[in-house]
Image (cartoon, grey):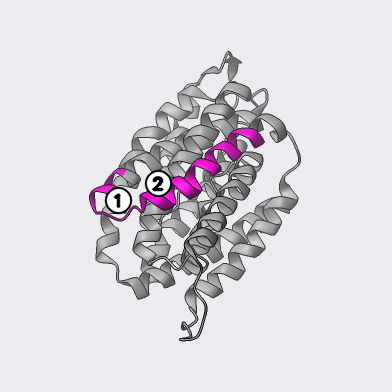
Amino acid sequence: MNTQALLLPVIHEFAQILIFIKPINNIQYKSGVSMFSANNYSIIIILGIVSFVLSFFGASVGLMLGQIRLPLIVYALQSTANGIGIATGTNLATAAMGACAGTYYHIKEGRVNYRVVCAIGIPSAIGAIISVLAFARIQADWIKVVIGIVLIYSSFQIANPKKPNQGEDKLSTHQRFLIEIGIGVGLGLLAGIVGLGLASIRLPAMIRVLGMEPKEAVGTNLAINFLTLATGGTASMLTLGVHWPLLLSLVPTTLLGSYIGAKTLKKIESSNLRKLIAWVLGGTGAFMIAESMH
């Protein structure tokens, strides 16, 4: 598997956005519904293509890459009342749909660990709801910078896995369960604050801390991400609102991209998958830092 070849479509699409995307202007917003002018449909098409690429690429490594889509939606909706809040709800809902499609295929292939899903996913979902309701309007840029640094560090750790020592103590079942709950609660709280599923933080924790096999971690992580995004997205839609026309436009391409991306995982060897995950984590971390400092 050529990792660079997989990265090129994402880089190309992102470059096209930076060149061509512009705000959705002249929007009449009322009760979560907007009317688009004829000139705005090109933006919807661009975002739809981007969502397909991100979902395809993300589902193959257990992520939804909402970190990249969120600032683009915010920029497109900047002329809308409460644009940032609405963009957050729209992004979470879009990512939830993609995670649902990818999770379905990972379940079919037996890549989902249900015990870990319950131990991490349920606390993540609860944490996401609490943070959306309590902290949705706080300034989260500094949090994104910290997350970005952690992701870059994690990418190096994933790319260069340490060899287990024979005398190294393994975690007991009780210790593992407490760690899983702690990971779930912490990341769930952060997810609601920054408007992201934060699967990119959870994935290296599952591989490095819990010692899960990469393909199982990918499928399980996407399933947990679905729970977090679905609950956080629902809470966000109820409190901050959602841009329904844009959401409905993004759902088809997001579902399709995620399902196809999940199917490609079985063609990737574990060693190459680690390298691919490392590239994605490092790139996502760098993007979050740059976007937060903009």
At a point 60% along the width and 67% down the height, the residue shown is 152
Q: Is residue 220 above or below residue 254?
A: below
Q: Is residue 278 above or below residue 26?
A: below
Q: Position of residue 62 (x, y in %)?
A: 41, 55
The verdict on residue 106 being magenta is yes
Q: Mark 1 and mark 2: span between their CA atoms?
A: 8 Å
The verdict on residue 51 being magenta is no
User: In the structure shown, which secondary structural element does the residue marked by tag 2 occupy?
Assistant: helix
Q: Is residue 53 visible?
A: no
Q: Nearer the viewer, residue 11 or 235?
A: 235
Q: Position of residue 71 (x, y in %)?
A: 60, 43
Q: Amino acid at mark 1?
A: His
Q: Position of residue 46 (x, y in %)?
A: 44, 40
Q: Amino acid at mark 2?
A: Ala
At a point 46% along the width and 83% down the height, the residue shown is 163
Quadrant location of the N terminus?
Answer: bottom left
User: In the structure shown, which secondary structural element does the residue marked by tag 1 occupy?
Assistant: helix
Instruction: Left or right? Give the position of 16 relative to 112.
Output: right
Q: Is residue 118 visible?
A: yes
Label 1 environment density (alpha carbons within 10 Å; few <14, some 14–19, many ≥20): many
Using the image, tell me which numbered label, if any, was put on residue 20: none
By secondary structure, the bulk of the magenta-drawn segment is best described as helix
At a point 42% along the width and 34% down the height, the residue shown is 250
At a point 40% along the width and 60% down the height, the residue shown is 217
Instruction: Left or right? Give the position of 29 relative to 53.
Output: right
* Residues rendered magenta in the picture: 104-131
Q: Residue under label 1, please give it.
A: 106
Q: Residue under label 2, please give it.
A: 223
